[in-house]
Image (cartoon, rainbow, N blue to C red):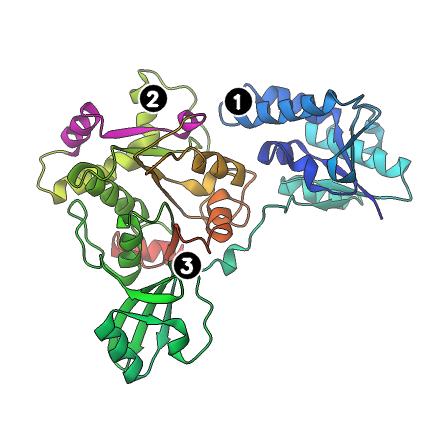
Amino acid sequence: MRKIYVLDTNVLIHDHRSIYSFEDNEVVVPIYVIEEIDNLKRNSTTAIQARLAARELDTIRKKGCIAKGVELEKKIFFRVEIESDLNLLPSVLKKDSMDNMIIATTLGIKNKNPDMKVILITKDINMRIKADSLGLEVQDYETDRTDYTTLYDGYEEIEVSRDIYNKFDKAGKINVWELGKEYHFTENMFIKFKCGEEKTFGRYIGGKIRRNLEGQISAWGARARNDEQEYAMELLMDENIKVVTLVGRAGTGKTLLAIAAGLEQVVERGKYKRLLIARPIIPMGKDLGYLPGSEEEKLRPWMQPIYDNIDYLAGEKGEKTGEKVILGLQTMGLLKIEALTYIRGRSIPNGYIIIDEAQNLTPLEVKTIITRAGENTKIVLTGDPDQIDSPYLDSDTNGLTYLSEKLKNESIVGHVTLKKGERSALAELAAKLL
């Protein structure tokens, strides 16, 4: 049975090609959505996504009259609904609210099509609650949704016999089938073998578990403080791994390890030509508005966590100030710290790229970033899916979780979930209990 799906603005902003996700059904966009998209083009946070959505709608417009409806691929019938009866809304709801206007449009479509199921698709939680209260069927946009609670950690601990333990310890590798049980490891998953009180580590690569090579390596003065950080360091320092995702709550060392490994391989070892560190510009709480000064001065408040980490690492190396180190590396062209907005449209070869706070990115934005990678480029994405500042993303729909799940079986991709806090006893206590 064909259904009618009415799309809210935030769905098109989240994925400008979301229209094509409703195969063999009718897709309707209220005229108010187009008005909102036009307004969002002036918002620095959503400008690019809004323009992509507008271009997609314009491409469809060229195929026919979108007011009457256009046949698209996958047997999708698309149209823009220009009629709306605001009297369908209860008096308690404001008639000049865009959300309420879209709800009114959906109610009108439902009244005109009593024999068809009409479903409003929106990523706005409050809008879903209001629409449901008014008798509409409403859903989140779930095409790119993953279950964060089932996201793999990137490591596993197994108990083995003395014979297996000794064989691995001596040879440095072992076939999975030799373990005597059926295991379903993902590529680059870390395995901790335990035999009584003894333990040793390995990484699953192409059907075999091979002993870790990097282990206790020091990167720019930083060393791993726990097993999870050792796993992360192994992936960060491996040239064969092109994409690394590090997930964990505040204080687990995600950003610090990524920056340390990047500086080590760019500055000390010369494996890459430069280190590029970027993060999305999304405020926590109310935005401060426009900031005065040069580009660097404007970005400084947003990038301060990056500077703090480099300052800490510089102290570990005995440097007097982190500022001196940062300025020196920037002058030599080895380090670039910038807003994520500037990475679009670029091709970056021979670079070590760190995307911090990646949980605030959509799956489409993450795809855009990954496709920037040129030859001999490594990309590291860090973030905490439990701390999302974007209003239309959650732990299941953000780009970091999506990327980690979708690429988990690829040989050039690695993932580690860091759980143990190392910032301080107070920070660990707050992360657990507050």
x then y, percent, for residue 63: 76, 23
Residue type, mark 3 in image: Glu
Q: Mark 1 vs mark 3: give the one in front.
A: 3
User: Of residues 291 and 75, which is closer to you in this image?
Assistant: 75
Is tag 1's residue or tag 2's residue first in the polypeptide sequence?
1
Q: Is residue 333 magenta?
A: yes
As helix, strand or loop, the secondary structure at mark 1 comes to loop
Name which residue lies at 40% across and 59% down: 154
Q: Is residue 96 visible?
A: no
Q: In the picture, residue 315 is in which quadrant?
A: top left
**Going by the image, does 351 lie left or right of 341?**
left
x then y, percent, for residue 392: 57, 39
Q: Residues within 10 Å of mark 3 (few under 14, many from 20)?
A: many
Q: Quadrant of the C terminus?
A: bottom left
Find residue 298 and name its label: 2
Name which residue lies at 42% across and 30% down: 281
* Magenta stretch, residue numbers: 322-345
Q: Residues within 10 Å of mark 1 (few under 14, many from 20)?
A: few
**Going by the image, does 396 lie left or right of 209?**
right
Find residue 143 and name its label: none
Q: In the picture, residue 309 is in which quadrant?
A: top left
Separation (CA) of disc 2 from disc 3: 41 Å
Give the residue pinned by disc 1.
43
As helix, strand or loop, the secondary structure at mark 2 comes to helix
Separation (CA) of disc 1 from disc 3: 40 Å
**Going by the image, does 283 lie left or right of 64?**
left
Name which residue lies at 68% across and 41% down: 21
As helix, strand or loop, the secondary structure at mark 3 comes to loop
Residue type, mark 2 in image: Lys
